[in-house]
Image (cartoon, grey):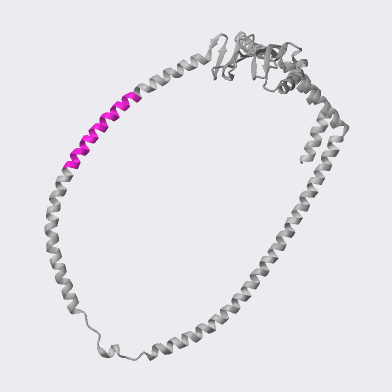
Amino acid sequence: MLHILWLILKFILIVLGIVLGLFLLAVLLVLFCPVRYKVSAVKTEDDWKQIEGEGVVSWLFHGISLSARWQEQKMEFSFHLFGIPISKLLKKRRAKKEAAQEKPRQRNAKKEKQTELAEKAEQKIETATEAHSESEECGQSSEQGDSGKQTSVQQEEKKETDVPKPTVEETDRPKTDELVSEETVQTESSKTDSVEASSQKQFFIKKIYNKIRRLIKSIQAKLRRIRRTFDKIRSQASWWRAFLIHPRVKAAKDLVWKHAKFLLKHIFPTRIEGQITFSFEDPALTGTALAVLGMTIPFHKNCVQINPRFDGENYLQGNIRAKGRIYGFVFVRAALIIYFDKNIKYVIKRWKTRRA
């Protein structure tokens, strides 16, 4: 029994050792196996459309590589995993899927066409039968319409004879009551108009007063807000000034800037080669461009040959190639130094207290 337990423990320990070994190997590869890159650009003709460029990023001794190529105004990408073109395999798989999906679509399209033709034939037959039935109904409705018109004319004549006519006495009756009522309405309307006019004046004055009062209150509130904002800005400016002037903050800034420059220098290409020949219509522009390009000599260490031409024509031709590598442990080392620095911790702590 103990022998079996020992074998199980042995198997578990072996598996754990293999997993830990693989994990350590992956960490070492990430830290010490560099990511290499290459960039190249060529322009051989006067047309700007003839520019060609290529960029390659590889890791694990070119086991994993990603390349991009610009040619004939088109960008092409390719991904290789230990020499296997993954991008091409994915394209082939997509093409197969699209071909498999197109077959049932074509079948469905044929079926839809057949059903549409059958529906059109049925619609033609239905329209023909409906037209025949409508023609028969129109003949019957015309006969019924003539008889209905005669009966309606007779009914209208009977209604005209039955309407009573007004008598002479009713038309000649005096209208004194209406005149009296009109006079009383006019007097009442004049009184109401005067009352309404006075009430409207009072309402208009109150409305203007309320508007002026509200406007004054809004102006006062805006002035208070502006004063508060100015006070906040003043307090923040004083805090930032004291924060940036502090010696420990200055030391932290110097440390970060030092490692940032080192990392930029590490990322920058280790080798640059090329040749550039250019000219402008204005010779003064050619001279200024030459001066600007001369400032880049410390970066490429005079490995790029610059040939200016003062012909008075727009001309550009040349090629550039650059290589570089990036190590992971450089970034890890810089991050650890910055994180464990006392000045950086002081800055973080003070910033958190300020935010709180």
Which residue is outermost to the front?
Answer: 312
Left or right of 259 on screen, residue 93 = left
Q: Is most of the magenta stretch helix, strand or loop?
A: helix
Report which quarter residue 203 is drawn in. bottom right
Left or right of 139 on screen, residue 119 = right
Left or right of 122 on screen, residue 200 = right
Residue 33 pos. (x, y %):
68, 11
Report which quarter residue 267 is drawn in. top right
Residue 354 pos. (x, y %):
79, 40
Question: Which quarter of the rendering shows the N terminus?
Answer: top right
Can you say whether 239 is above or below 110 in the image? below
Residue toward you, 55 or 105: 55
Residue 261 is a magenta residue: no
Left or right of 8 on screen, residue 257 = right
Residue 121 is a magenta residue: yes
Question: Which quarter of the rendering shows the C terminus?
Answer: top right
What is the span of residues highlighted in magenta in the rendered image? 105-128
- Which residue is rendered at x = 46% and y = 15% of the image? 92
- For the question of whether residue 85 can be seen, the reply is yes
- Which residue is rendered at x = 43% and y = 18% of the image? 95
Residue toward you, 191 or 42: 42
Can you say whether 130 is above or below 112 in the image? below
- For the question of whether residue 33 can be seen, the reply is no
Count the numbered circles shown. Answer: 0
Residue 241 pos. (x, y %):
84, 39
Residue toward you, 151 or 260: 151
Residue 301 pos. (x, y %):
76, 12
- Which residue is rendered at x = 78% and y = 16% of the image? 298
